[in-house]
Image (cartoon, helix red, strand yellow):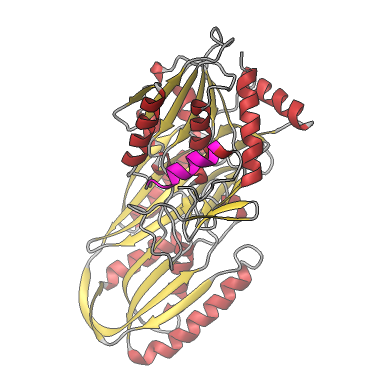
Amino acid sequence: MDLLTGLEPDRVFYFFEAVSDIPRGSGQTEGVRDFLVRFSEERGLEAVTDDAGNVLIRKAASEGYEASPAVILQAHMDMVCVKTPESDHDFTKDALDLFVEGDMLYANGTTLGADDGIGMAMILAVLDDDSLAHPPIEALFTNDEEIGLLGAAGFDASVFKGRRMINLDSETEGELTCGCAGGETIFCVLPVEKIRMKGLPVVITISGLKGGHSGAEIHCWRANANKLAARLLNEIQSVAAYSLESISGGEKDNAIPTEARIRLVIDEEDYQPIVKAVESFEKSVRREFRGIDDGIRVKLERGTVHKVDVLSMDSQDKVFGLLLCLPNGIFNMSGTTPGMVQTSCNLGVVRTGETEFVCTIGARSSVLSGRSALELQIRALAEMFGAAVRTESAYPAWEFRENSALRDTMSSVYEEMYGKAPAIVTIHAGLECGLFTSAVRGLDAVSMGCTVLNIHTPAEKLSISSTARTWDYLKQVLASLK
């Protein structure tokens, strides 16, 4: 602790550093959950942990707000754990290595976890400060949002007393988000066979890609390392024969993959032609993604001749074909909201095991039929190559509400504070508000947040000045909710 001492707002950054000291990758949130319970006990607040790992904390209204309807403040506990190839950070036990550069807060070599650690910190600062004016508060910290909104899906929303929800999981100051896409995770599982052969092993690494959030940045047309790997195999195939040992790439279905690794076994005399093919490929894709993804690098390393387990020729052809043909990126655009992506998918993770090749795809759409059409296409394509398809973690879209008293109040407060109207937006990324508004009749929800850039990547950074302004805005909103 104490790395962020001196930053304002001090209690917000105090709590941000506190949760950053606790490993909280998806599926490993026990530590931060225990922290929330201790926090509540120390302040005499009611806290309940449910079977899905969510924590609900209640705080009574401040003086003069006792008769006001409750407001729900909501953020998620887990973070996406991505690091640079050079980093030796262990997300299962290490605290994040935070540092400040100008107005920006970073983590050294890893994701910062401001998505949604800063939302958690602001809610904790509200619960901690008895001088603030506010209605009764229900603070919900959800579990495992980043791997399919699992905590929100398992939460019994009937326990809510409030019918107004402020979600603190948005990343752009000055925007009020009032709708989002729904989504699901699609797995394509292809059985493979392996044979043993002797040859020269080579490893090809595609790296340096920007990556990013597969919803918020899919419209940027950034390169996908897994799709580049398939294209590179095609280039190599045109100059030399090879046997494929494995392909691996990406870490999360909701993060555009920044790196992929191909392991091949070749004849020694084919090494130089492959070197030239790799060099040519790097030049061509760097030209193709110029101005979009300028950091692409393709590196070839050779080993020594020995026996290696590789895919059979039939399995190799199927793996190559499936990887090359699976869709990735924008499926279609909205016809009613100019510039908004309606349906998309991200080929986020590929792995080659001993008996299976698995592709994990994050699919999103603001229209259920659009997501169904995308899934149908993926199923048909996968089955052509002999792969089975299963889906998990489906969540509904959050439809824009024409009449919202909460949105009106928050807009008025923003105009009074800054002399201009906030942007009212719907987004292609997924938010838990869709699950809560589907479960609670009449729930009025708005999502807000401070400026966080490059989420789900090691380049993630949080604006300190934006955090201060957003904290002031949140306090004023709470004071206005009588």
Task: Determine if residue 336 is in view.
Answer: no
Residue 426 as seen in the image, left or right of residue 124: right
Q: Which residue appears at 65% of the width and 55% of the height?
A: 102
Residue 218 as seen in the image, left or right of residue 55: right
> Looking at this view, is 23 or 202 the one in front?
23
On the image, the x and y values in percent for residue 285 come to 57, 71
Q: Which residue appears at 22% of the width and 61% of the height?
A: 355
Q: Residue furthest top?
A: 67
On the image, the x and y values in percent for residue 286 come to 59, 72
On the image, the x and y values in percent for residue 111 come to 48, 53
Task: Determine if residue 438 is in view.
Answer: yes
* Magenta stretch bounds: 11-22
Q: Quadrant of the C terminus?
A: top right
Residue 17 belongs to magenta span: yes
**Dividing the picture into quarters, in which one does residue 426 lie?**
top right
Q: Is residue 146 above or below residue 226?
A: above
Q: Residue furthest right?
A: 419
On the image, the x and y values in percent for residue 221 come to 59, 57
Q: Which residue appears at 51% of the width and 31% of the height?
A: 123
> Looking at this view, is 11 or 169 the one in front?
11
> Looking at this view, is 415 or 290 the one in front?
415
Residue 452 belongs to magenta span: no
